Image (cartoon, rainbow, N blue to C red):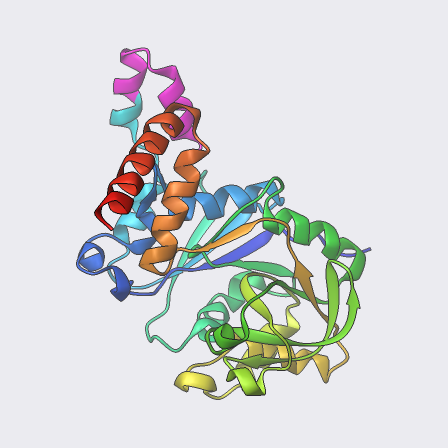
Amino acid sequence: MRRKVTKAIFPVAGLGTRFLPATKSVPKEIMTLVDRPLVQYAIDEARAAGIKEFIFVTSRGKGALEDYFDHSPVLEQELRKKGKDDLLEVLKSTNMDSGEIAYIRQHKALGLGHAVWCARRLIADEPFAVILPDDVIAGEKPCLQQMVEAYAETGGNMVAAMEVAPEKTSSYGVLDVKENMGSVVSVNGMVEKPKAEDAPSNLAVIGRYILSPSVLRNLNQLKQGAGGEIQLTDAIAADISSDVPVYGYRFEGQRFDCGSKSGFLQATVAFALEREELRDDLMDYITTITQGRQAAE
């Protein structure tokens, strides 16, 4: 019987330089889409998938991220005194019980593979998930939950995948597809950030993974790859030669790249439009500025 995936690694050590000056003092992961930080979307998705242990790979200056998951007795008492029970429930969803969450420092910025490797002692010999909070995925069923259900049938390693324009392949890890089985594809290999003419497909890996502990052993052996970093895709691809299967999973949902300003703004608008109490005012505003621009042109 396959072991359940109950641990997830959240690599959050990046400096968020594309969002300076805001990220000079605020970790990018707690910047908000409407009224919820990026990291809360990732946590909620992980919980829906059955994750019980949350491992954050951080760096210096991320203290506010750690504080976010802590209990706030003064705030809770004030809300309780004012009878704001709805806000109390919202607050409870941000709290982590003792032992649920762990923080590990990545002292050098050596890439995603290195960040995952930093958490190796907390993973031991279990399958585990990796979630990149920059990739926010809106869907009827959370992306990682979809993957966990598919993984129960396949085992091996599984990466979330979506089709991208050929000229965009140089920004992603790209799958070399062996067999197309609908939502799931088996994989011959993975290439990190290939040029369009060298890409084996246009099926790109995005920030959700379910991995075998053998990937951590592969990371022990890896040297720097593309961009001078230790690439997670190289460690996953190495499993293929060891007869550990690798699958891509075409998830259902819309992915927003919240590591970029445009993606962050698109996600903000999309999530706001899903909120009944915000939708009408926001649509009126969008209509007004669109009409104003058209009139000016």
Instruction: Decide: is 48 above or below 234.
Output: above
| x and y percentages locating residue 276 in the rendered image | 43, 25
Left or right placement of residue 245 versus residue 172 in this view: right
Q: Is residue 215 magenta?
A: no
Q: Quadrant of residue 60?
A: bottom left
Tell me how many marks there are.
0
Q: Is residue 240 visible?
A: yes
Please report the residue visible at 74 percent of the width from the left and 61 percent of the height from the top.
184
Instruction: Decide: is 83 above or below 165.
Output: above
Q: Is residue 99 visible?
A: no
Q: In this orientation, which residue lies closer to the viewer: 257 or 285?
A: 285
| x and y percentages locating residue 72 in the rendered image | 30, 32
Left or right placement of residue 266 versus residue 132 in this view: left
Q: Is residue 80 magenta?
A: yes
Please state, as top left, top right, bottom left or bottom right, where the N terminus lies in the image: bottom right
Please report the residue visible at 44 percent of the width from the left and 69 percent of the height from the top.
115
Left or right placement of residue 194 versus residue 155 in this view: left
Please report the residue visible at 55 percent of the width from the left and 47 percent of the height from the top.
46
Please report the residue visible at 25 percent of the width from the left and 19 percent of the height from the top.
78
Q: Main secondary structure of the magenta part?
A: helix
Q: Quadrant of residue 70?
A: top left
Q: In this orientation, which residue lies closer to the viewer: 123 or 266?
A: 266
Instruction: Decide: is 191 above or below 23.
Output: below
| x and y percentages locating residue 188 in the rendered image | 72, 80
The magenta segment = 77-93
Q: In this orientation, which residue lies closer to the viewer: 87 or 176?
A: 176
| x and y percentages locating residue 171 in the rendered image | 46, 74
Q: Quadrant of residue 25?
A: bottom left
